[in-house]
Image (cartoon, rainbow, N blue to C red):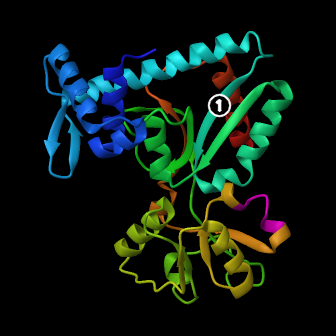
Amino acid sequence: MHSVSLRYFLAVANTGSLGEASEKLHVTISAISRQIAKLEDEVGYPLFERQPRGMALTKAGELLAAHVRRTLLEGEQVLDEINALASFDRSTIRIASSEAFARDILPRAIARYLEKSPGTRFELSVTAPQDVTLRVCNGDADIGLTFSVLRDPEICVEYTRSSPIYALMRRNHDLAARSKVSLSDLQHFPIALLDPGTTIRQMFDMASSFDGLLFDPVLTCNNSSTLHVFTQISGAVSLTSRFAVRAQLTKDGLVAIPIDHPAMALRSVQIQTLSGRMLSATLKGFLAQLIELLEVE
């Protein structure tokens, strides 16, 4: 439903590289370059800045990319709804999510929605928080569910709520009976942390630096499930959100204790969609189901 030049333009905008766009589209770089030049001639403005390490969108290019992404998604949505007329309301919802929500909340939300709309199909991609937002911005996901401390101008935040960071530990830990703990309390015990690319680690490092505290984690890992198990086995402290572990605490013999520091409450949960996009009835229905579950957590 889109012209060749717009499809080629969007592929370069999403990848930042003629070479990567060529591989994705299975066409030659020269063909892509010709279509972009043609499009720039029609628009009357350069759409990319040619840089040594790739292609960067100009302001005009950013405006066009945002428009193309929205209209492309809406075009796919219309076709999906037309097809649903003859296929028992069959449509597909693509979700990008942080790991924490993929363990419990999203499986429950999807299962409940399928009870009401059995023809709906779901595609779930579990990835890093910043990649969730990127997938929504690029049109690779209809809905993003992630943790964030900022708002992206290309993103519509359909729902948000504060998601404080907790200290996770065994029930027999020396700090387990407290109603809250300080960062200085945690210095006296082994700690296991997520890698610096996660919002939990970024908030923890910022708060520790502000208080002049240094931590030497016994384990650094990019998978929170691994840290959860390690906390059970070793007795070390790790960091978590209630969304990630609420359903497992009692079963796993763990407790989650609030951390008494303002920076540890700056993070929020966000349900994200592409700004300016018209949402189908199916997407709106699933969003309502997801928000209902998040509200009771």
Please state if 21 lies on the left or on the right of 196 as rendered.
Answer: left
Q: Which residues are magenta?
A: 245-250
Residue 195 in percent (x, y) is at: 48, 70
Q: Is residue 278 visible?
A: no
Residue 96 in percent (x, y) is at: 57, 43
Residue type at tag 1:
Ile
- Vertical arrangement, residue 188 with respect to residue 149, above or below: below
Q: Which residue is label 1 attached to?
A: 93
Please state if 239 lies on the left or on the right of 42 as rendered.
Answer: right
Query: Which picture quadrant has residue 39?
Result: top left
Q: Is residue 249 a member of the stretch shown in magenta?
A: yes
Query: Which picture quadrant has residue 164?
Result: bottom right
Q: Is residue 81 visible?
A: yes
- Vertical arrangement, residue 157 with respect to residue 99, above or below: above
Pick the front one: 126 or 239:
126
Pick the front one: 188 or 6:
6
Q: Is residue 161 a member of the stretch shown in magenta?
A: no
Density class for disc 1 (Cα within 10 Å; few <14, some 14-19, many ≥20) is: some
Label 1, secondary structure: give it: strand
Q: Residue at left 47%, top 41%?
A: 135
Q: Residue at left 66%, top 39%?
A: 123
Please state if 5 lies on the left or on the right of 266 as rendered.
Answer: left
Residue 163 in percent (x, y) is at: 57, 53
Pick the front one: 217 or 26:
26
